[in-house]
Image (cartoon, rainbow, N blue to C red):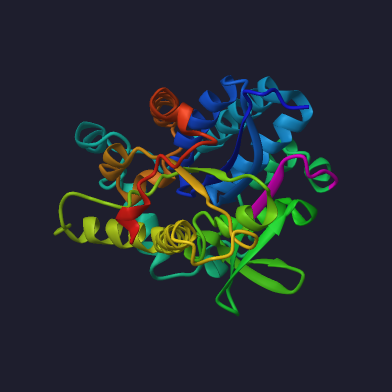
Amino acid sequence: MRAAESKRIDLALQGGGAHGAFTWGVLDRLLEDEALEIVGVSGTSAGAMNAVVLASGLLAGGRAGARRALDRFWEAVALAGSWSPLKPSPLDRLLSEGDMDTSPAWLWADALSRLLSPYQLNPLGYHPLRPILEEQVDFALLRRQDRVKLFLAATDVRRCTLTVFDNSRSSVEAVLASACLPFLFQAVEIDGAAYWDGGYMGNPPLEPLIDGTDCDDFVIVQINPIRVEEVPTLAASILDRLNEVAFNSSLVRELRTIARINELLAAGWLPPERYRDLRLHMIGPEPAMARLGYSSKLNTERDFLLRLKALGRARADAFLAAHRADLGVRSSLDLARFL
């Protein structure tokens, strides 16, 4: 039986490549709070990877096990990345906190990806994270339990629809499908369907949490900033913002829908037996992440990942200090700004 002071939450984890290390830090801090009970986790791309590592660790070793599992995963990502030529140049290190915009290897790889597809550049379909996931995540355990409900988002290439893989369909292939950027990797085939990164259709999806759990508190861990202060004017900045807009559009639509449903419920226009008042919360480092460009999402240097983890821990700590009492009581996210 749950303790009376227990706070039940669902987690919705955005994707964003190496920026997922920020979510690592957020989860590390949330797992320290023994009164927080994680009911369900929705994730996309790097968020899907964090989700399966978190759930597998929780089931095998509780909170401490989940923290160790996340540490092992991201340390393995950093180790694998140490062999990559994609590293910030000396000028990048001077001008930014993780971008690789002047790195010769990044410039070459970025230009080549616009000329040749991954079917030509990577005909064997190699993915550097596959062996890490296979070694560290017990997918068989995830499939045979539903104590921590999982929802992994991917985009069906042929149908232009969102596909959500739940516990029963969780696998290495499902995670790689959720994280399949089409300029870098071949579409992932599962049961005859081809999938690209879930961020195009749901980043992260909230509806599966609404329908698949009985929890009313959703904590969204955001990576891609929704709002920025200035209109980008440089070519690279414009492309960065286009990427952020594309990967936030589905989340903004869902937040608008939830805000409208809550508004209609409060006014008595919707039947409470069919709809419930949802409480939304968000942990997101928008000012910090807004300064990082797209190239930094492929930067897996250990020091960079650890800086993002520290930022995530700090933001989660600030969220708990300001809004822990709101959990189970009221939304701390102002949904009015999405209407």
* View extreme (bottom): residue: 159
Residue 206 figure quarter:
bottom right
Horizontally, residue 89 falls left or right of residue 257, namely left
Q: What stretch is highlighted in magenta?
A: 144-152
Horizontally, residue 165 falls left or right of residue 45, namely right
Q: Does the magenta stretch include residue 147?
A: yes
For this rendering, which residue is in front, 35 or 164? 35
Residue 35 figure quarter:
top right
For this rendering, which residue is in front, 41 or 112? 41
For this rendering, which residue is in front, 220 or 180? 220
Q: Can residue 239 be seen in this view?
A: yes
Residue shown at 73%/38% (left/top)?
Answer: 137
Measuring from the top left, give residue 62's x and y in whole percent: 72, 24
Q: Is residue 284 magenta?
A: no
Residue shown at 17%/57% (left/top)?
Answer: 232
Residue shown at 81%/48% (left/top)?
Answer: 143
Horizontally, residue 40 falls left or right of residue 112, namely right
Quarter of the figure that contains the C terminus: bottom left
Asked if 102 appears above or below 300 in the picture, the reply is below
Residue shown at 60%/49% (left/top)?
Answer: 42
Q: Is residue 124 visible?
A: no
Residue 158 figure quarter:
bottom right
